[in-house]
Image: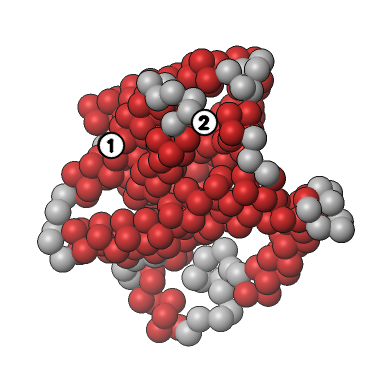
């Protein structure tokens, strides 16, 4: 996604288009949770909850292979004028992308702004995985809802999150393009909402009694909805730091995101031995709250929204010429 945004989106439209593109993730989670509950009750039973999303993924791949393109200069479905407009509006140039860039591995591994961003995304991934995967188990253990009711309640926060994502995207685009608010202020403000509001809601859950179903479910909804601001708060920061290496950075981040998503159910399984015990769940909620709080604090102090020095492309061809000149 981030690589495509760097190649296809003009600088002044990245926040808007990035927010809209990332909203598909929220819609997918909500749709998956709802469908899982109802497909499990269908004549196909629970295996349908796996087969149907897999089939949908295959259909999407067919559409992508027909209509998709890696970059504007290889796309056969845009005009020459459109291609020139995109390339002249702050996206990666054809010359830069065709050259074989030497990847600055050491600079990336020691870049404080990127490492802070990475930690931030890990905390988001752990929180999203916990909310998406474990909340149905929590609701079943605490309140024993029927499976279709459980699915609807679990999907509700993500449906509201979807709407919230569109609202936040439009507002941030207005602030950046019309009001000319500094990018760093918008990014860090939105990321603070995406971290500290869920942290507060999760900490509040640990203080509520098990019988307060409305309060606990409200805290879950607030947690997930507030996370809708993380796309514009930090996800697009990959492109801010290094538009030339945005696909690489997002790939590295994505690897750690997957690890965090895998770790979440393992951590819950180790801590929550009794799904009916709210105190065991509180350990998970408080850990998540602390993780979100600390990572945003680091992001506020050390996060940057400008291209880093190592973003400048140094091609292998350039290195060779320099060596010959020496």
Residue at left offset 44%, top offset 23%: 209
Residue at left offset 53%, top offset 58%: 27
Residue 13 image-quadrant placement: bottom left
Image position of 123 (left or right of 134): left
Q: Is residue 119 visible?
A: no
Residue furthest right in the image = 43
Tell me the quadrant of the picture where the C terminus can be found. top left
Q: Nearer the viewer, residue 206 or 244?
A: 206
The percent coordinates of residue 292 (x first, y second) are 38, 27
The percent coordinates of residue 46 (x first, y second) are 81, 48
Give the number of the disc on residue 192: 1
Image position of 74 (left or right of 18): right
Q: Residues within 10 Å of mark 2 (few under 14, many from 20)?
A: many
The percent coordinates of residue 36 (x first, y second) are 70, 51
The percent coordinates of residue 259 (x first, y second) are 60, 29
Residue named by callout 2:
126
Give the number of the disc on residue 162: none
Residue at left offset 21%, top offset 63%: 174
Sequence order check, earlier mark of 2 and 1: 2
Q: Nearer the viewer, residue 170 or 272?
A: 272
Quick check: 158 above or below 222? Answer: below
Image position of 73 (left or right of 219): right
**Secondary-structure class at tag 2:** helix
Quick check: 301 above or below 21? Answer: above
Q: Residues within 10 Å of mark 1 (few under 14, many from 20)?
A: many
Residue 123 image-quadrant placement: top left
Quick check: 166 above or below 219? Answer: below
Residue at left offset 52%, top offset 65%: 71
């Amino acid at each position: 996604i981030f690589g495509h945004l760097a190649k296809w989106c003009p600088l002044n439209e990245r926040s808007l288009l990035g927010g809209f593109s990332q909203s598909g993730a929220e819609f997918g989670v909500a749709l998956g949770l709802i469908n899982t509950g109802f497909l499990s009750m269908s004549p196909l039973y629970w295996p349908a909850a796996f087969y149907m999303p897999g089939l949908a993924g295959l259909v999407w791949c067919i559409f992508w292979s027909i209509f998709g393109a890696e970059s504007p200069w290889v796309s056969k479905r845009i005009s020459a004028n459109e291609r020139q407009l995109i390339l002249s509006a702050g996206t990666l140039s054809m010359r830069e992308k065709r050259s074989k860039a030497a990847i600055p591995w050491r600079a990336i591994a020691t870049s404080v702004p990127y490492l802070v961003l990475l930690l931030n995304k890990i905390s988001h991934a752990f929180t999203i995985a916990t909310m998406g995967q474990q909340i149905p188990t929590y609701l079943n253990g605490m309140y024993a809802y029927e499976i279709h009711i459980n699915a609807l309640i679990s999907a509700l926060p993500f449906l509201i999150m979807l709407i919230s994502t569109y609202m936040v995207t439009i507002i941030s685009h207005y602030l950046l393009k019309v009001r000319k608010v500094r990018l760093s202020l918008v990014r860090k403000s939105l990321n603070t909402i995406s971290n500290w509001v869920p942290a507060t809601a999760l900490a509040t859950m640990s203080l509520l009694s098990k019988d307060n179903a409305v309060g606990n479910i409200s805290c879950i909804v607030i947690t997930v909805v507030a996370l809708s601001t993380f796309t514009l708060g930090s996800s697009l920061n990959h492109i801010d730091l290094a538009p030339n290496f945005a696909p690489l950075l997002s790939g590295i981040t994505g690897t750690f995101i997957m690890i965090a998503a895998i770790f979440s159910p393992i951590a819950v399984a180790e801590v929550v031995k009794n799904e009916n015990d709210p105190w065991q769940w509180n350990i998970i909620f408080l850990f998540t709250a602390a993780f979100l709080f600390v990572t945003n604090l680091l992001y506020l102090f050390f996060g940057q929204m400008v291209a880093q020095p190592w973003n400048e492309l140094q091609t292998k061809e350039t290195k060779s010429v320099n060596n010959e000149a020496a």
